[in-house]
Structures are given as structure tokens and as C-alpha cells.
Amino acid sequence: MSIAEIVIACALAGGLAIPFSMVGQGGGSTYVPILLAVGMEMHEASTTSLFMIMLASISATFVFGRSKTVDWKLLMAVAIPSLASSFAGGFTAQWVSVPALKILFAVVLMIAAIFMARPVTREGAVPTFMPRTRLWNRVCGDFKYAIDLSVIPVVTLAGFIAGMIGVGGGLFVLPLLALLFGCPLRVAIGVSSTYVGLAAVTGFVGHLAGGDPFDIWVALPLAAAAFIGARIGPTLSLKTDTDKLRWILAIILVGLAGWMIAKIFV
């Protein structure tokens, strides 16, 4: 890659990191196409993208953590089993119809986007069909809420499916927490922003262990751009009305669902 190509990639990555980090997403699905467009090889692009997400997540977590919107115990409760199941899902992908799963997952994302964009009468409301028998009372900053412990197996299963189709965990963690389990949106965003970083660490180590190429001197300026963008995004997020954040997330979910389907046929 030439210096000009790196500069272009940095500008695009930093700009895209802002809206993605506003709603707790990693942005890897956009980083990889950018890196491919400026001439980076696929395996190196995947590894570099994960490195960028790691740095962006650290940046976002610092902002959200300082504002006390990251529920650390909830994060660990869902992250540890779901990251393990995601690894298992990736391993079993060779035996399943991945395109069919991608279409199904994309449809689920679009449905989640529709519900995310709907007006909310009460923050943290839980659908009537969801269990509320094994409640875990949580306090995170100014937020008090109760999460049913069934969130752990549900997110673990979602992690397994996400691992099979090769998508980031933040895509399912945030909608599940906010829409089905009554987690306040700002807390769900904070948890997701840290979760995507943990997921990126496991993926990054796996790529390096598998011998994928990685140029630290190219990756550092790209990661720095993502880091800066992911510092701006959460700062804006904390100043943005939750209804607007829901719309931003809904647009991102629809866009990623469309991109997922397009990759199957193109």
C-alpha cells in the first residue's frame, strides 16, 4: 500500500468509526472492504480490521466506562460463554449451509431494526412473551433494571450462529439486550462496545496463530484513525437522544443486513 492509499483508508476508517461507535458496533464489516479497495490482501485485511476494532473498542470503552454505562458484570456474564460458542460455531461452519443461515440472520437483523426504530413508551420495557422468573437486579450508574438470567443461554446460542456465518457479536448482543431483555439502551450500547473488542481480540489471536499476514506499521495508523473516531462517536452518543440513537442503530442494522445478503449473490 502506498502512503496515499493509507491516508485514504485512515480517513474513511476514522469517519466510519464515529457512527458505528455511537451505537456500540465495531465496524469491521466496513473496514475490510475499505482495506481491500486500497489493495490489501483478504487475509491481511481481516487481521488488520480486527486490530482496528480492538483499538476502537478500547477508545469507546474508556468514554462509556467513564460515564458509567458499561455493566461489567453483565458484560462478563454474556461475553465469556458467547465468545466460546462463537469459536465453536466457526469450527462447525464447514458442515452447515452458511448462505441460508446468512439470509436468515439478515432477516432477523431487519426485523430487529424495525422494532428498534419504533417509538418507545418506557425505557427497558420487556415483551410479554419473554420470561421474567429468574431476575438479576442490576445497577449501572443512574440505571436500575432487572435482566432475566435466560439472557446467558440466548446470547450464547446467538454467538454460536454468528460464529458460523462469520459476523461480529455486537450485531446481536445489543438488539437482544435492548429489545428482549429490558436493558436500557445506553447500557446495552456500553456493553456492546466492550464486547466487540473482546471478540476482536480472540479473532485477532486466531488469525495470527493461523499464520495470516499482518503489517504492524500499516495497521497502526489505521487503528489510530479508528481509535480517534471511536472517541468522538461515544462522546456524541452520550449527548444524543435515545430515540435518535435507535434510528442510527436501525439504519446500520438494515445496511449490514443488506450487505450480508449482497455478499451471497455477488
Image: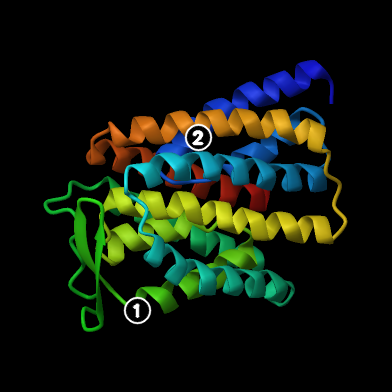
Is 88 on the left or on the right of 133, as rendered? right
* Mark 2 vs 1, N-terminal side: 1
Coordinates of residue 128 in the picture (x, y in percent): 17, 72
In the picture of the structure, the residue carrying the numbered disc 2 is 230
Q: Amino acid at mark 2?
A: Ala
Query: Could you tell me which residue is drawn at 50 percent across and 49 percent down?
Result: 257
Please rate how many residues cluster around mark 1, counting C-alpha atoms within 10 Å: few if below 14, some from 14 to 19, many from 20. Answer: some
In the rendered view, tell whether residue 59 sits above or below residue 99: above
Coordinates of residue 218 in the picture (x, y in percent): 79, 31
Residue situated in front as seen by the camera: 172 or 194: 194
Coordinates of residue 191 in the picture (x, y in percent): 41, 55
Residue situated in front as seen by the camera: 105 or 142: 142
- The answer to which quarter of the image holds residue 165 is bottom right
Q: Secondary structure at mark 2?
A: helix
Is 261 on the left or on the right of 143, as rendered? right
Query: Could you tell me which residue is drawn at 45 percent across and 28 percent down?
Result: 232
Mark 2 to mark 1 CA distance (whole Å): 31 Å
Query: Could you tell me which residue is drawn at 63 percent across and 30 percent down?
Result: 224
> Which label was assigned to residue 150?
1
Report if residue 167 is visible in the image.
no
In the rendered view, tell whether residue 159 sits above or below residue 149: above
- The answer to which quarter of the image holds residue 205 is bottom right
- The quadrant of the picture occupied by the N terminus is top right
* Disc 2 + disc 1, Cβ < 8 Å: no
Q: Secondary structure at mark 1?
A: loop
